[in-house]
Image (spheres, rainbow, N blue to C red):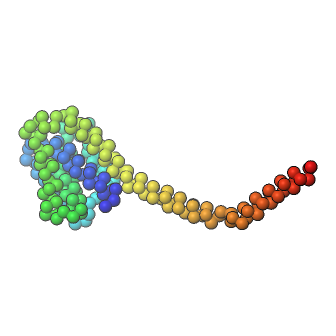
Amino acid sequence: MTLNFHALWTLTGMGAVVFSTFLAPTRPSRALAAAAFAVTAAWSLWFGPPSPEVVGLAAAMGAIALLLRPASVLVGPVLGGGLAGVWGAMLAAQGVPWWLAVPLAAIGPVAACLRARRPEFAPPQLRDEALIIVTVCALAVAMLPGVMDGWQAAVNLSVQSSEQAAAAVVPAWTLAIGASALTLGALYSMWSRR
């Protein structure tokens, strides 16, 4: 498991709960979340989870959209269910049987739906702060693969340059002859001026 995997795992788990607090207490909203969950879980189980860049950008754009327009009807259910489905597949990738991982991933969003019955469960200020945290984490997850590739390229270049530098190093015998010639020349100069 790589750093990209763990960062995506954290974002999908956290984002699923945060976005699910924006579900409206209506049947169409819940049906949309369930459909998004089923589609992304099936897709991620068969083809693997989407790339961190795609998930990170989608989560960041969704969080920003909800910060700007909290009454958006589609963003919360689609991203809440979608991220939970991806999270279920990622749990399965860690060795949890898929028949257990998928329902386990749905527990967070289902619990977050408590907000529809009890508004004090997730007040607006708490949801806004959670969206800011999701935005920052999502942007970090989206940038992480590029940063890791750049870091690996820098490591490869430094290894190559150190190998080239080692090949270009002046041999020790050359340095010894040069240092002895310099020392003998200085000694001769001091002796001849006497």
Image side of residue 118 versus residue 49, left or right? left
Tell me residue 177's x, y (percent). Answer: 76, 63
Give the answer, above or below, for where 6 lies relative to 71. Answer: below
- The image shows residue 182 at horizontal and vertical percentages of 80, 57
> For the point 55% across and 63% down, which residue is it?
160
The image position of residue 153, as x and y in percent, is 48, 59
Q: Position of residue 96 (x, y in %)?
A: 18, 63
Number of residue marks: 0
Residue 184 versus residue 154: which sits nearer the camera?
A: 184
Q: Is residue 81 above or below residue 46?
A: above
Looking at the image, the residue that sits furthest to the top is 125
- In the picture, measured across the screen, residue 164 lies left or right of residue 26, that is right
Camera-side residue of 157 and 55: 157
- Front residue of 25/107: it is 107
Residue 79 shows in this picture: no
Q: Is residue 148 visible?
A: yes
- Left or right, 1 with respect to 177, comes to left
Residue found 89% across the figure and 53% down from its top: 191
Residue at image x 19%, y 34%?
A: 124
Residue 152, placed above or below residue 127: below
Left/right placement of residue 47 relative to residue 145 reads left
Q: Residue 179's image quarter?
A: bottom right
Query: Which residue shows up at 22% across the image and 55% down it?
Result: 87
Specify the quadrant that holds the N terminus.
bottom left
